[in-house]
Amino acid sequence: MNAQRQLLLRLNWSIAALLVAYAPQALDKPVWITGLLIGCAAFRWYGAHRRMALMPAWIRTPIGVACFFAVLNSYGSINGVEPGSALLSVMAALKLLETKNQRDLFVLLFICLFLILATFLQEQHLWSVIYLIAAYGVTMVAWMAVSREGALRSHQWYATQAGRGLMLATPILLAMWVLFPRVPGPFWAIPSSTSSASTGLSTTMSPGDISKLSESNEVAFRVRFDAEPPAQGELYWRAIVMRQFDGRSWSADEPVYTQNGVRAINAISRPVAYTVTMEPTNQRWLFTLDMPRRWEGKSLYLSRFQTLQRVQPIDERIAYRAVSYLDYQAAPALSSRARSWYTQLPSGGNLRTRAFVGELAGQHADPETFANALLQYFREESFFYTLSPPALGRNSVDDFLFGTRRGFCEHYASAFTFAMRAAGVPARVVAGYQGGEQNPLGDYMIVRQSDAHAWSEIWLQGRGWVRVDPTAAVAPQRIERNLDSALREIGERDQSAFDLPVLARLQLTWDVVNARWNEWVLGFGPETQRNFFEWLGIDDADWRDLTLLLTISLVVIMGIITFWLWRQHLPPRRDKAARQFAALQARLKLVAHAGEPPMQYARRAAGLFPDEADQIRAITHQYLRARYAQDDAAQQRLPTLVSKIKRRYRALPR
């Protein structure tokens, strides 16, 4: 009966550990895998309580083969984190059907540990650490229940032992985390079949692309300025320059490293220094304030379009420093070849716009005057800034300027740039972000996906590339404040619950916590590790130094843990009263028998030493009062009484 109860206890904890380990992946896995795991767990639990025989191998084997091919069919492969974790989940479900001894349960718990790790490889948000600790805790409790032999213990006992083990492992974990030599890129940066760029920006821009991003509240990057941040209207974060237009969509050239990108920028004044912590995008562009002139970071360069690029795709969170100049002169000279690039338009199409531009250019021959007249046209005519613009046809610029007149930033930037080129003025589209939300709790700025923006740049003789944002002509509140303000003003966005001061502060506090988590945990790579040791006063620590420090630290930690465990298993030290009674026995050279009560010992000792009988009985009486009645006065008298018998005993005959 006790063996059956022990089996049920072990099985219950193992099933609980498996379900907890699998739970975060349930929504991402095919429904049949979740159903299989829950079904196998319920079947095995019911069978154990009913003492049913295990499912025979001739049934389990074809089920296992079928599940293998089902995983292969669902993912197209068995390689990678997601197919691998799906296969592990199937293995765990089928393993439940054959668990009959301690070894089988240990294999199941090993699979649980790998499932927990697989979740962390796919999801690194702060909540995953809470899950990680909880899941490992449940798995360790199950481990204690499975490994425990002999009499059954309470659930609290198993939980206490598991917690104790995790507590002892924590210093080792921290030492290995800080001191283990880092390699470029985080350990968990494993390609996933479902991974995608989190920024949403791409090298092509069609009507409606950026307006879709406005619905995302995800963080694109965070910025910490060395001094006071610039005004909201000056925060243009450039990333992609698009020069090719096919009549509907704009596209960018592949960035090429060249020294001309830096040489083309003349810094005038107002330098702004800042540090950007950028989320992974799987692309090569980075975000810098107009106009970048200096930067610090590995494998970074400025393209010929004055955009900061990295040689390798950004598949991990990175941090880099940059200095931008808000007053600048970009490419004051333009070659004839470059001029042809930036005035090129597809032959045919958008005929109404071409005719309109020809008429307007006849009235304003100067390029800057023509640009201002075009912006004035946007202001005075019935143009609307909207998050839900109507669809446009093949002649998208004509449809927008003379038809719908409702659009988002990409509509205005596209139409303005097309019109400038049609007038013979070099122009291009720039995509990036505009604005940002200052987080006073962390002293940094948050730039979200909803801040995605597109604007134009036109080339003017003697001034070079000049930023022109046609959106500001229609919705200046979008530039001067933020997107929410613009959309609320036109009635396309209601008051949010997060606009309440308390909830807004909570949201900013949570972002600070996430930012620190990203910086000190997910972003703890070679550079962060090196900076940490420089802060400690250790310069240029290479992998040999780190390995030596790690070895010494582990030896010290293991020594402390071993000493602590040794002290925990020492027999309890006798109290002061017991030590005095032991001193009496040593002085009389008469040891108490095993299990002999103090009064019985006193009678035996008094019989052997009649001259000391009264003193022996007095010591025993005081000992009992001090030991069991917690009498402090008796405790204080004991040493005096024992010392007297010591002096008298020197004269006793042997």
Image (cartoon, helix red, strand yellow):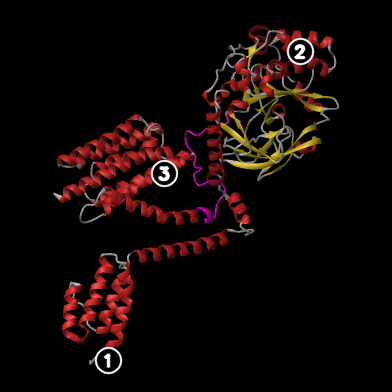
Taking the view exactly as shown, the residue that stands out farthest to the left is 1
Of marks 2 and 1, the one in the foreground? 1
Q: Residues within 10 Å of mark 1 (few under 14, many from 20)?
A: few
For mark 2, what is the residue?
A: 376
For mark 1, what is the residue?
A: 651
Q: Secondary structure at mark 1?
A: loop
Q: In this picture, which residue range is highlighted in magenta?
A: 177-199
- For the residue pair 311 and 490, the one nearer the viewer reads as 490
607 vs 327, left or right, is left
Q: Position of residue 532 (x, y in %)?
A: 60, 53
Disc with the residue nearer the chain's start (2 vs 3)? 3
650 vs 234, left or right, is left
| Mark seen at residue 132 | 3
Disc with the residue nearer the chain's start (1 vs 3)? 3
Most common SS among magenta residues: loop
Inspect the image, locate mark 2, and give the three-letter code of the amino acid beneath it. Gln
Question: In 3D space, how far apart are the residues under numbered discs 1 and 3 (Cα atoms)?
Answer: 72 Å
* Above-or-below relation of 212 to 636: above
Disc with the residue nearer the chain's start (2 vs 1)? 2
- For the residue pair 250 and 30, the one nearer the viewer reads as 30
Question: In 3D space, how far apart are the residues under numbered discs 2 and 1 (Cα atoms)?
Answer: 122 Å
